[in-house]
């Protein structure tokens, strides 16, 4: 069937995911035909032949064009067959690309619909985590403390901020709270799940050198209390006493450790806890089913 130049065109987008990829690519192509008017109808999560039949019944009736991104080889083949049978123009945006990559890699695709959407969700999760972490740096905005995934506590220059940012890039919402000598720990800290809290400590000599370098870089006198050996030891011992009183907080010594190393240890513990919770939940479900 020929489409008259005066006709408007309706494009039906079919996808076993969200259809965003097909819509974006089709719109990109349509921009090259600025004088034509195109209308879109999108069908998401199309996973059955019956659903495809209903869509093509409409497309054939109205002389629409179909653009599709479907992962399943069986459904792609079915769309091609029904397009030919119903005389509907259709374009497979994903199939040829999957075939080409399969040939290059010499392996079959996973054939899982919606993976790109899942990747995008993960990206936006990371963006939200970074934003949350920056807004909760250095003990700020503790009213929303319960929304976090991790709380880092420690005295000054124990890598709280850089470690927070690093963990946020893994999608974790992180709060860091400074422990200040002889100042009370925020009460809000004890109102949340204590398993979220991680203490950071460091060896006195290493901390003193870090603080001296910090003061030098700032052009400040290095002879004050901030980098004084006795004061540094006093701060560390005071912080360690707080950690002793809160034994549910895992403690990590950051002395001469790269951020990646400490972050990996924290992530490992979080993943282990997550697996244990999953096992407990499964055990509970099985026991409930058997009872």
Image (cartoon, rainbow, N blue to C red):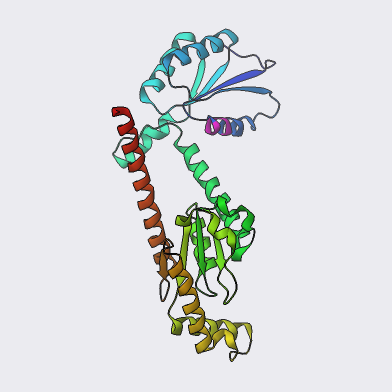
Q: Residue at x 52, y 9 (%)?
A: 57
Indicate the position of residue 100 as horizontal and vertical percent values: 37, 36
Q: Quadrant of residue 26?
A: top right
The residue furthest bottom is 223
Indicate the position of residue 6 as horizontal and vertical percent values: 70, 16
Q: Is residue 84 magenta?
A: no
Tell me if residue 273 comes above or below residue 198 in the rendering. Answer: above
Front residue of 46/56: it is: 46
- Badge count: 0
Indicate the position of residue 228 as horizontal and vertical percent values: 54, 88
Image side of residue 108 versus residue 68, left or right: left
Front residue of 191/150: it is: 191
Quadrant (top left, top right, bottom left, bottom right) of the N terminus: top right
Q: Is residue 22 magenta?
A: yes
Tell me if residue 224 comes above or below residue 41 in the rendering. Answer: below
Q: Residue at x 44, y 37 (%)?
A: 115
Q: Quadrant of residue 50?
A: top left
| Secondary structure, magenta segment, majority class | helix
Front residue of 57/38: it is: 57
Tell me if residue 95 comes above or below residue 87 in the rendering. Answer: below
Q: Specify the segment rendered in magenta.
A: 20-24
Q: Residue at x 55, y 86 (%)?
A: 227
Front residue of 149/70: it is: 149
Quadrant (top left, top right, bottom left, bottom right) of the C terminus: top left
Q: Residue at x 58, y 89 (%)?
A: 222
């Amino acid at each position: 069937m020929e489409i008259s130049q005066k006709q408007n065109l309706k494009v039906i987008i079919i996808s076993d995911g969200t259809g965003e990829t097909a819509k974006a690519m089709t719109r990109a192509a349509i921009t090259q035909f600025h004088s034509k008017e195109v209308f879109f109808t999108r069908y998401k999560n199309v996973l059955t032949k019956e659903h495809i039949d209903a869509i093509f019944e409409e497309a054939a009736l109205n002389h629409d064009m179909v653009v599709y991104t479907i992962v399943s080889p069986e459904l792609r083949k079915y769309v091609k067959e029904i397009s030919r049978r119903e005389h509907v123009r259709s374009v497979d945006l994903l199939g040829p690309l999957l075939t080409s990559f399969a040939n290059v890699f010499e392996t079959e695709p996973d054939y899982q619909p919606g993976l790109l959407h899942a990747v995008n969700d993960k990206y936006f999760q990371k963006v939200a985590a970074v934003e949350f972490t920056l807004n909760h740096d250095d003990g700020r905005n503790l009213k929303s403390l319960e929304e976090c995934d991790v709380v880092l506590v420690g005295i000054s220059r124990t890598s709280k901020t850089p470690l927070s940012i690093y963990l946020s890039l893994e999608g974790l919402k992180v709060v860091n709270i400074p422990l200040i000598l002889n100042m009370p720990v925020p009460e809000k800290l004890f109102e949340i799940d204590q398993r979220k809290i991680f203490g950071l400590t460091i060896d006195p000599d290493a901390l003193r050198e870090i603080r001296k370098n910090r003061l030098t870089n700032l052009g400040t006198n290095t002879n004050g209390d901030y980098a004084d050996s006795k004061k540094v030891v006093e701060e560390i011992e005071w912080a360690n006493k707080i950690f002793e009183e809160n034994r549910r907080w895992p403690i990590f010594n950051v002395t001469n450790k790269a951020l990646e190393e400490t972050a990996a240890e924290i992530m490992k513990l979080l993943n282990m806890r997550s697996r244990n919770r999953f096992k407990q939940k499964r055990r509970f479900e099985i026991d409930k089913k058997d009872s």
